Image (cartoon, rainbow, N blue to C red):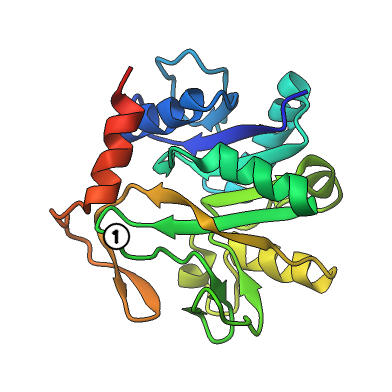
Amino acid sequence: MPLVAANIVTNEPNSTKLYLTEAALKKQGIPAHITTSVHLDTESPYTIIDEGFEYLGRNRNIGAEQVIERYDPIYILFIDDDILLSKKWLDSFISVVDSCDPEIYHTRLLLPNGGRCWDYCSINPHMMCNYDQQRPNWYITGGYWCVKSNLWDQHKWDDNIPMYAMLKDKGALNEDVEYSLRLAKNGLVPTFDVNNLAWHFDNRYKQVQSITVNTHNCLGYYCPEFIKSLMYICGE
């Protein structure tokens, strides 16, 4: 039984980012399954979802079922196809698990330019908080979650919320907001590991004060720490 196994969600066939996401997991011996809408050229097992791929919670639930069936891990890591784990991610994760056995584990999530990407947030107001600040109400972005398998079994993602629901219906909640609120309502609080990090490899985004914004343009700057992570992931 591995400590942690991942499910990756992707709808892009054989993208470089997916390759890097898988490679970062393999570097640390974390097994993975992929839920996708397309055929892939990969060694990782994957499940094709022919209809309803826009329902991200459903994709993650299907992936979690496969991860548990194949690997039976203590924790499930839900990640999108552009999330890269840093070199010491697993070591830091193990250290926190050994010290406090968290139900929900979370870390810093940085952008290639070094800015933050919705990594330690409150919902109302919707903003990133300082790492040493108490959050009035917590929120985790949907592309990067790590929870105990038995917690997911009790509290699954909502199958019926479409992608970017809040943009389509002013009264709706996105799947990650709904999930955060529901778990918080059940008394659950993430354990935040400020010493660990993952990267959101999407250089359209940048941090503007306490929020992360999509510029809809590719920003060319990569910070040195991100470049080091890419070299580690791509190295032998």
In this orientation, which residue lies closer to the viewer: 201 or 192? 192
In this orientation, which residue lies closer to the viewer: 103 or 144? 103
Image location (x, y in percent) of residue 102: 76, 54
Image location (x, y in percent) of residue 99: 76, 51
The quarter holding residue 69 reads top right
In this orientation, which residue lies closer to the viewer: 132 or 20? 132
Image location (x, y in percent) of residue 81: 43, 38
Secondary structure under the numbered disc 1 in the rendered image: loop
Relative to residue 68, is residue 106 depicted above or below? below
The quadrant in which the N terminus is found is: top right
Q: Residue at x 78, y 26 (%)?
A: 72
Drawn side of residue 208 relative to residue 151, left or right: left
Q: Residue at x 52, y 73 (%)?
A: 131
Drawn side of residue 110 relative to residue 175, left or right: left
For residue 15, say whether it is visible. no
Q: Which residue is mark 1?
A: 114
Relative to residue 35, is residue 213 depicted above or below? below
* Direction left: furthest residue: 220
Q: Residue at x 49, y 23 (%)?
A: 26
Task: Count neighbours of disc 1 (C-alpha within 10 A) and say few if under 14, some if 14 to 19, many if 20 or more.
Answer: some
The quarter holding residue 137 reads bottom right
